[in-house]
Amino acid sequence: MGPVSLRPDCPCGTGATYDACCGRLHRGAAQAGTPEELMRSRYAAYAVGDGGYVWRTWHPRTRPLDVNPDPTLRWTGLVVEDASGDEVEFTATFEQDGRPGRLHERSRFEHRAGRWFYLDALPDPTRG
Protein backbone atom coordinates (compact mmCIF):
# COMPACT_ATOMS: atom_id res chain seq x y z
CA MET A 1 0.00 0.00 0.00
CA GLY A 2 1.29 3.48 -0.85
CA PRO A 3 1.71 6.43 1.46
CA VAL A 4 -1.33 8.13 2.95
CA SER A 5 -1.71 11.87 2.46
CA LEU A 6 -2.39 13.96 5.54
CA ARG A 7 -3.75 16.70 3.29
CA PRO A 8 -7.50 16.64 2.74
CA ASP A 9 -7.24 18.16 -0.75
CA CYS A 10 -5.76 16.10 -3.55
CA PRO A 11 -2.39 17.46 -4.71
CA CYS A 12 -3.50 17.12 -8.35
CA GLY A 13 -5.54 20.31 -8.05
CA THR A 14 -9.07 19.16 -8.88
CA GLY A 15 -10.43 20.42 -5.56
CA ALA A 16 -11.61 16.95 -4.52
CA THR A 17 -10.29 15.18 -1.45
CA TYR A 18 -7.27 12.94 -1.89
CA ASP A 19 -9.26 9.82 -0.94
CA ALA A 20 -12.04 10.57 -3.45
CA CYS A 21 -9.62 11.60 -6.21
CA CYS A 22 -6.13 10.20 -6.74
CA GLY A 23 -6.04 8.21 -3.50
CA ARG A 24 -8.50 5.67 -4.93
CA LEU A 25 -6.18 5.19 -7.94
CA HIS A 26 -3.09 4.90 -5.75
CA ARG A 27 -4.84 2.23 -3.64
CA GLY A 28 -5.85 0.28 -6.76
CA ALA A 29 -9.59 0.78 -6.13
CA ALA A 30 -9.97 2.38 -9.59
CA GLN A 31 -8.08 2.89 -12.86
CA ALA A 32 -7.50 6.21 -14.61
CA GLY A 33 -10.08 6.62 -17.36
CA THR A 34 -8.18 9.22 -19.41
CA PRO A 35 -4.58 10.31 -20.01
CA GLU A 36 -5.26 13.51 -18.04
CA GLU A 37 -6.57 11.56 -15.05
CA LEU A 38 -3.49 9.31 -15.16
CA MET A 39 -1.14 12.30 -15.43
CA ARG A 40 -2.83 14.01 -12.46
CA SER A 41 -2.64 10.81 -10.42
CA ARG A 42 1.06 10.41 -11.24
CA TYR A 43 1.73 14.02 -10.17
CA ALA A 44 -0.15 13.35 -6.91
CA ALA A 45 1.88 10.15 -6.41
CA TYR A 46 5.11 12.13 -6.69
CA ALA A 47 3.67 14.70 -4.26
CA VAL A 48 2.83 12.07 -1.62
CA GLY A 49 5.96 9.97 -2.26
CA ASP A 50 4.27 6.93 -3.82
CA GLY A 51 7.00 5.78 -6.23
CA GLY A 52 5.36 2.37 -6.57
CA TYR A 53 2.30 3.88 -8.24
CA VAL A 54 4.46 5.94 -10.59
CA TRP A 55 6.36 2.78 -11.58
CA ARG A 56 3.19 0.67 -12.05
CA THR A 57 1.66 3.29 -14.37
CA TRP A 58 4.81 3.69 -16.50
CA HIS A 59 4.69 1.79 -19.81
CA PRO A 60 6.73 -1.44 -19.51
CA ARG A 61 8.63 -0.55 -22.70
CA THR A 62 9.96 2.77 -21.33
CA ARG A 63 9.91 2.57 -17.53
CA PRO A 64 13.06 2.57 -15.41
CA LEU A 65 13.99 -0.29 -13.09
CA ASP A 66 12.55 1.58 -10.12
CA VAL A 67 11.18 5.00 -9.19
CA ASN A 68 12.33 6.83 -6.09
CA PRO A 69 10.75 10.28 -5.68
CA ASP A 70 13.26 12.88 -4.49
CA PRO A 71 12.46 13.62 -0.83
CA THR A 72 14.04 17.08 -1.13
CA LEU A 73 11.41 18.14 -3.69
CA ARG A 74 8.10 19.53 -2.46
CA TRP A 75 5.55 19.66 -5.27
CA THR A 76 3.48 22.84 -4.93
CA GLY A 77 1.10 23.02 -7.89
CA LEU A 78 -0.13 21.61 -11.16
CA VAL A 79 -1.66 23.34 -14.17
CA VAL A 80 -2.92 21.23 -17.06
CA GLU A 81 -2.47 23.38 -20.16
CA ASP A 82 -3.80 20.98 -22.80
CA ALA A 83 -5.19 17.46 -22.87
CA SER A 84 -6.00 16.04 -26.28
CA GLY A 85 -5.89 12.50 -27.57
CA ASP A 86 -3.07 10.60 -25.91
CA GLU A 87 -1.05 13.70 -24.92
CA VAL A 88 -1.20 15.99 -21.88
CA GLU A 89 0.74 19.23 -21.56
CA PHE A 90 1.25 20.55 -18.05
CA THR A 91 3.36 22.72 -15.79
CA ALA A 92 4.20 21.48 -12.30
CA THR A 93 5.78 23.76 -9.72
CA PHE A 94 8.01 22.69 -6.85
CA GLU A 95 10.42 23.86 -4.17
CA GLN A 96 13.83 22.34 -3.60
CA ASP A 97 16.28 23.59 -1.00
CA GLY A 98 14.08 26.66 -0.52
CA ARG A 99 14.20 27.58 -4.22
CA PRO A 100 11.19 27.49 -6.54
CA GLY A 101 11.25 25.50 -9.76
CA ARG A 102 8.98 24.35 -12.51
CA LEU A 103 8.64 21.40 -14.85
CA HIS A 104 6.92 21.92 -18.19
CA GLU A 105 6.17 18.76 -20.14
CA ARG A 106 4.03 17.31 -22.89
CA SER A 107 3.54 13.70 -21.87
CA ARG A 108 2.45 10.87 -24.14
CA PHE A 109 0.28 8.00 -22.95
CA GLU A 110 -0.68 4.64 -24.42
CA HIS A 111 -3.78 2.54 -23.78
CA ARG A 112 -2.99 -1.17 -23.50
CA ALA A 113 -4.64 -4.12 -21.77
CA GLY A 114 -7.56 -1.89 -20.79
CA ARG A 115 -5.40 0.67 -18.93
CA TRP A 116 -3.60 3.92 -19.62
CA PHE A 117 0.19 4.05 -19.17
CA TYR A 118 2.66 6.93 -19.23
CA LEU A 119 4.87 6.37 -22.29
CA ASP A 120 7.31 9.28 -22.43
CA ALA A 121 7.73 13.04 -22.63
CA LEU A 122 8.14 15.03 -25.80
CA PRO A 123 10.97 17.59 -25.84
CA ASP A 124 9.98 20.99 -24.42
CA PRO A 125 9.90 23.38 -27.41
CA THR A 126 10.46 26.36 -25.08
CA ARG A 127 13.93 25.08 -24.17
CA GLY A 128 16.77 25.64 -26.58
Image (cartoon, rainbow, N blue to C red):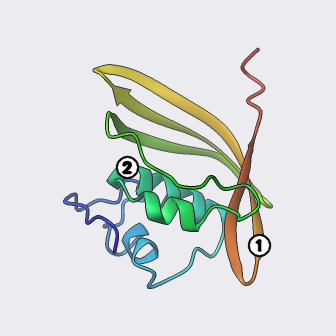
Per the rendering, the mark at residue 119 is: none
Q: Quadrant of the C terminus?
A: top right
Q: Is the C-beta separation of discs 2 and 1 under 8 Å?
A: no
The foreground one among 113 and 35 is 113
Side of 41 where 59 appears, left or right: right
Label 2 Cα crowd, 10 Å radius (few <14 / some 14-19 / many 20+): many
- Residue 26 lies in quadrant: bottom left
Residue 10 picture quarter: bottom left
Image location (x, y in percent) of residue 32: 58, 74
Which element carries disc 2, helix, strand or loop?
A: helix
Q: Does residue 13 appear in the picture of this structure? A: no
Residue marked by disc 1: 111
Direction from residue 6 to residue 64 in the image, left or right: right
The quadrant in which the N terminus is found is bottom left
In the figure, residue 122 lies in which quadrant?
Answer: top right
The amino acid type, in three-letter code, at marker 1 is: His
Judge whether 109 appears above or below 21 on screen: above
Give the x, y percent position of residue 109: 74, 60
Residue, disc 2: 47
**Residue 74 in view here:** yes
Is 19 left, or right, of 105 in this rendering? left
Q: Residue at x 46, y 74 (%)?
A: 25
